[in-house]
Image (cartoon, grey):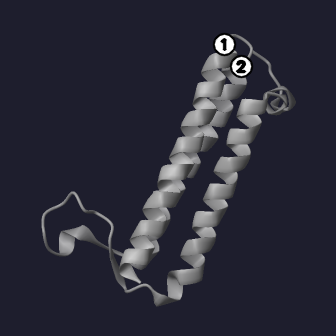
Amino acid sequence: MNTSFKILFSDRVIFVSLVLSAFLYVGSIAFVLFFYRSLPPFLPLYNKLAWGYARLGPTYEIAIPIGIPILLSGVNIFLEKYTYARTPLLARLLSLVSLLLALFTCIFIVKLVLIIV
């Protein structure tokens, strides 16, 4: 149960997925920061709600779709650390889930910003 992070990063699948997810998160944050000045004051972030102002959120709420997956990926990294000693396959699956979170977050952010701008 007491696995260090060095053992996690020696596994190639976990290391590659961690590097790619970090790259995708940094890329989506940089993309938002680059276009932040040209975004309108309200963004259509809540598309599941009914028509009207309920679907719109202030511009600073663009950080929510980036922040929640980063938090979940951090939790997954600590879960990987504690499950790697018993079941390395579960740790690899958790790292791939983190990679998919980062990929879908990046796609969502890029699509949203490019539709609005």
Question: Looking at the image, which residue sits at the far top?
Answer: 86
| Image point (68%, 40%), residue name | 17
Compared to residue 50, the image places residue 92 above or below, namely above
* Marks 1 and 2 close (CB-CB < 8 Å): yes
**Which residue sits at x=76%, y=37%?**
15
Residue 54 position, x and y percent, is: 20, 69
The quarter of the displayed image where residue 117 is located: bottom left
**What quarter of the picture does the N terminus occupy?**
top right
Q: Position of residue 29 (x, y in %)?
A: 60, 67
- In the displayed image of the protein, which residue is found farthest to the bottom? 38
> Looking at the picture, which amino acid does disc 1 mark?
Thr
Q: Residue at x 23, y 68 (%)?
A: 55
Q: Nearer the viewer, residue 13 or 39?
A: 13
Which disc, if any, is residue 84? 2
Q: Label 1, on which residue?
A: 87
Mark pair 1, 2: CA separation: 5 Å
Residue 72: percent from left, percent from top: 54, 42
Front one among 95 and 53: 95
Left or right position of 110 against 17: left
34 w.r.t. 15: above or below: below
Quadrant for residue 92, please give it: top right
What amino acid is at disc 2? Tyr
